[in-house]
Image (cartoon, helix red, strand yellow):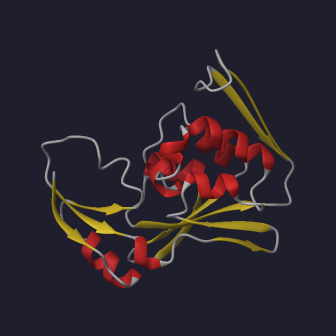
Amino acid sequence: MITDYHRPQTLKEALTLLAQPNTVPLGGGTLLSKPTIATVSVVDLQALDLNTITSKGNELEIGATVTLQQLLESNLAPAALKTALKLEAPLNLRNSATVAGTLVASDGRSTFVTALLAMDAKITVTGKQLSVTNVGEFLPLRPKGLITAITIPTNAKFAFEYVSRTPADKPLVCVALAQ
């Protein structure tokens, strides 16, 4: 149950609020909409300008609060990544689920995270200090702080294939390769 709601205007203010016990970030809200008896305070990230997709040289920087659907519709996203995004969640969830929230909530069946792992995506985590780590190191350690961006290379060849019962089902198996 959400007991307190905060909407900071700066990243510094958000980090201060998130340092408090039982306080979690609110991006798309798909994780927080599940019924629970636990009480939490939420920090709404909407005002922090973390919802941009920017091409920087040979990299694509994806803000933490970019929704899966925004990324899917972006002309900058690789076609194979778009395939993985379509399989991650149905349209209504893609419209609200954020890239950072999907990464944090991922399980072993996430097509989006499989694609990020193959591309050796980098995660920018802002906390007491700024850190950049690849997805493979982030997932088991889950460092303290707030994900502010995910960066993928745009100069890599990338492929994603899957097998499922129907074209819209979660894959039984998926493979992502980057060179």
Task: Count every numbered label the image shows and give the total.
Answer: 0
Residue at image position (72%, 31%) is 175
| Spot occupied by residue 137 in the image (x, y as percentages of width and height) | 55, 51
Write down the quadrant of residue 176 in the picture.
top right
Residue at image position (54%, 57%) is 67
Residue at image position (25%, 75%) is 17
9 sits to left or right of 57: left
114 sits to left or right of 96: right
Residue at image position (49%, 64%) is 65
| Spot occupied by residue 27 in the image (x, y as percentages of width and height) | 41, 61
| Spot occupied by residue 86 in the image (x, y as percentages of width and height) | 64, 39
76 sits to left or right of 174: right
Closer to us: 50 or 155? 50
> In the orientation shown, which residue stands out farthest toward the top?
165
Closer to us: 128 or 165? 165
Write down the quadrant of residue 26 in the picture.
bottom left
Write down the quadrant of residue 15 in the picture.
bottom left
Q: Is residue 35 above or below residue 147?
A: above
Closer to us: 56 or 96? 96
| Spot occupied by residue 49 in the image (x, y as percentages of width and height) | 50, 77
Q: Is residue 92 above or below residue 174?
A: below
- Residue 76 appears in the rendering: yes
- Residue 121 appears in the rendering: no
